[in-house]
Amino acid sequence: MKQSIHTEKREVILRKAMQLMVIFSIPAIGLSIFRMSYLGPEPVVILHTLLGVLVWLNYALRKRLSYLVKVNLLVGLTCLIAVSGIVRFGILGSGGVVAMFSLFLAAIFWSSRAAFVLLALMIGVYGASFALFQAQITHINMDIEAFHLSYISWGLEGVLVLCFAGAVITLQGLQHQQYGHSLKFVSDKLDTQNEQLININKALSDTNKLLSIVLDNIPVRVFWKDTNLNYLGCNRAFAKDSLKAKPEDIVGESDYQQIWHAQAESYREDDLQVISSGIAKLNFEEQQTRRGGEVAWVRTSKIPLSDGEGNILGVLGTYEDITEQKLFNDKLTEAKAKAEAANLAKSQFLANMSHEIRTPLNGVIGMTQLCLHTTDLNSEQQGFLEKIDLSARSLLTILNDILDYSKIEAGKLELENIEFTVEDIYKQLEAIHAHTAVSKGLSFEIRKSSQAETLLLGDPIRILQILSNLCSNAIKFTSSGVVIVISDVAPQADGFYRVSFKICDTGIGIDKEKIDGLFTAFEQLESSTNRRFGGSGLGLSISKSLANMMGGNISVESRPGKGSIFSLQLMLAKAKQDIQLKDTDNSSKGHKPDLHGFKILLAEDNEINQQVVLGMLASTGADTEVALDGRKAIEMAHSFMPDLILMDIQMPNIDGVKATLEIHQSYPNMPIIALTANVMKEDVNEYLASGFADILAKPIDINKFYALLEHHKTRL
């Protein structure tokens, strides 16, 4: 492991001290040899010589010995040399100088306390040796008066004194140099840190100023309180609301002392909740009294104000003035409520108008169908009735378009997602439009896809509605030539199919500049009063909306005088299982069912509608009875015991829904079919939820009516 700077410096001082001891041990050993030549082999002198050799050996082995061993040997050897010299020759000689040097080394490498202990030991040894000398127990066997001995010994001792003095000065200088650098380093570091602290304080001051600027310029009010709910500070916007000249003026005050003192209790309850729970309360609306008693609305957020250790010191809050936004939202809510009420009124109006129009239409279409199907007519009479039927059905189409447009506009039209095949749509298009096209002298052709039998998921009724509208327009605007339906069902990735239809005609065509407005509601190519073609102008708009709702699109290519091509593109999922579909083309099932032996109760208050339904039932062989209202229907359900009930919805006394519920209490399995002019989806869903087995819309289509009777006959 890398040594510390302090350890390295002590190693340097130790190495220098060992080098100095080696240097001045040379004259010390020389002095010992000189003394032995006059005094003989005296123990102290021999000891000095051996100690000097050990000093050399300690230096020679410095790289192998540990720091502690080297230090103890150096200080210990120096002390032994000093003590033995003092004991033998007194303190005035070189022994005293060596003693001072040894004490200096002890202070450096051991401690000051160790140096004082060693000094006390030396004084004690010197005192004991002096007492022994005075008692003449020991003596110096040397003639110090001998000139040559005195001169040489004192000269050598002088050299030793100079060596020790030089060593002390060297070590002291080295220590000063080493530790002086450390002190200077520390001093420089302290200066650097002081400068950094000054810069940090300046940065903090600048940050505080910047924070104050930010707080004073943000568009929200900011405040903070202590746990006693007294203000600790705020920004200028908050101070302005509290009618203070500057933010500092609010420090120490409470909400009771502010202009909003009427709301003070509520504010403090929120503050205490935040402080006690430690949980923020965010984005809640409350009132605040302003100058002149005006009450403003504010959106407030409050969070606990905590220190670095998580101790809650108070509460920090912000709020923004939302008075204008609140007023705007209130007006918007009021406007929305009015719009919804108007939309509801419109929907209710359309539903009522639909019912009122469908009721007489049921008589017109019903009676026409009865005449066409049950009476002998000449060709002229049949032509008149067919035109009446066509006109009535055109009126019914317009009515249905208006209802669909209203539901699309209100976002209430819902699509089904059921299993069907394109082949089934072919059949219905053929049944609906082939006769009309042929009657105009046109050729009507459907070019089928090889994948037409693929079972798909979608809304076949709405797809048929789009295609039927496009085919009707093609036949309407084509006086000669052909109308061709080209279809393709192509598999795509992830189990989807691209289903496309093209309705091509050789009709009048469309100008390029008029194509953009073609799908706009109530827009028609000819707006003059003497236009040759009828229509409400809703069909293409509704078709476009339906296609978009199904994730598809309708496009058109056309040239005046050359005809048009309308394209429908849809992406439909494949059904997971191929099952046998029920044929939904009720028009192909218009044969009269044989109902001999079956009893049918008709609950209908309208005389014309009674005649229509009874006329349709007359040739089926069914045993029929009529109830003029819901109450009578309930009574006759018990007395007549019908196999099937045809129930009008809107009747006097008790309506059809309530009558059905009451009848099902006694006869839960009694099939009851609703006859209604209310064809809005929410109405149909309500009727089915009330227990009706089926819904038959007015005006009643005779083919669908017979198909429905046949279906329920098989279930009875």
Image: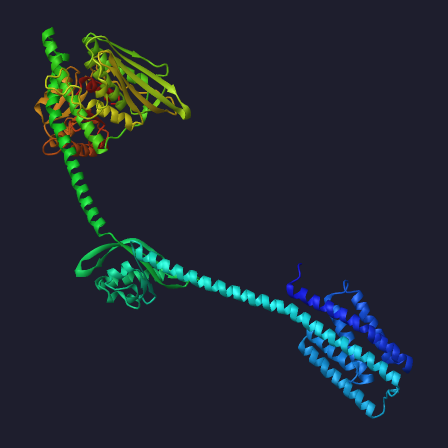
Q: Quadrant of residue 616?
A: top left
Looking at the image, can residue 144 be seen? Answer: yes
Residue visible at 62% across and 69% down in the picture: 180
Say whether residue 13 is left or right of residue 244: right
* Residue 108 to residue 486: above or below: below
Rendered-image quadrant of the C terminus: top left
Rendered-image quadrant of the N terminus: bottom right
Query: Between residues 502 and 17, which one lies in front from this camera angle?
Result: 17
Q: Quadrant of residue 563?
A: top left
Looking at the image, can residue 645 be seen? Answer: no
Q: Position of residue 165 (x, y in %)?
A: 74, 77
Q: Position of residue 488 (x, y in %)?
A: 34, 17
Q: Position of residue 514 (x, y in %)?
A: 21, 21
Say whether residue 253 is left or right of residue 158: left
Q: Position of residue 402 (x, y in %)?
A: 17, 27
* Residue 591 to residue 283: above or below: above
Query: Between residues 307 and 561, which one lies in front from this camera angle?
Result: 561
* Residue 93 to residue 609: above or below: below
